[in-house]
Amino acid sequence: MRANGDEVFSSTLLHLELTRVLRRERLDPGLARPLIERIHQVSIDDGVLRFAAAIERHVKSLDAIHLATCALLGAGVTVATHDAGMGEAAAAMGLDAHDPLGDDASHG
C-alpha cells in the first residue's frame, strides 16, 4: 500500500507472508528484512479485523486484512497487488489499485 507519495505501508501480515514464501522456496527468511525495514507496518487490531469481515465482495481472508488496513489509512492510498480479484475488490471499495507487475492500474 502506498500513501503520501513515496511512503509504503502494509499490514504486519506482509512479514508473515514473505517469510512463508521464502521458507516454501527453501530460502533464508532473513532475505525479507531489507524490504520489511523500508515499509511502515500497520498492526492488525480488532478494528482491522471487523472492517475485513465487513467487506462484501469475496476475497481471501488475508487479502481482506490487507484491504481493510489500506482503507483505514484513509485517502491517497493505492493498493499494490498482482491478484486481479483483490484489485477488483479494492476498486469496488473505492480504492486505487496498481499491479506492480502489469502495465495498467484500476482506479476506484
Image (cartoon, grey):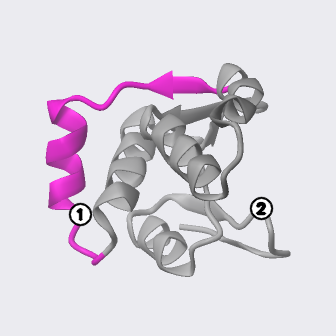
Residue 50 coordinates in the image, percent (x, y): 14, 45
Residue at label 1?
A: 55
Q: Is residue 52 magenta?
A: yes
Magenta segment range? 39-58
Residue 11 coordinates in the image, percent (x, y): 45, 36
Q: For the residue carrying disc 2, how many other residues have a C-alpha within 10 Å: few (<14), some (14-19), or many (20+)?
A: few
Quarter of the image for the N terminus: give it.
Answer: top right
Please tell me the numbered disc located at residue 100. Answer: 2
Residue at left offset 30%, top offset 32%: 44
Please tell me the numbered disc located at residue 12. Answer: none
* Viewer-side label of 1, 2: 2
The secondary element bearing badge 2 is classed as loop
Left or right: where does residue 58 sit relative to residue 6?
left
Vertical position of residue 50 compared to residue 63: above or below: above
Q: Between 75 and 14, which is closer to the camera in this rendering? A: 14
Residue at left offset 71%, top offset 46%: 27
For residue 4, say whether it is visible.
no
Left or right: where does residue 93 sit relative to residue 40?
left
Left or right: where does residue 57 sit relative to residue 87?
left
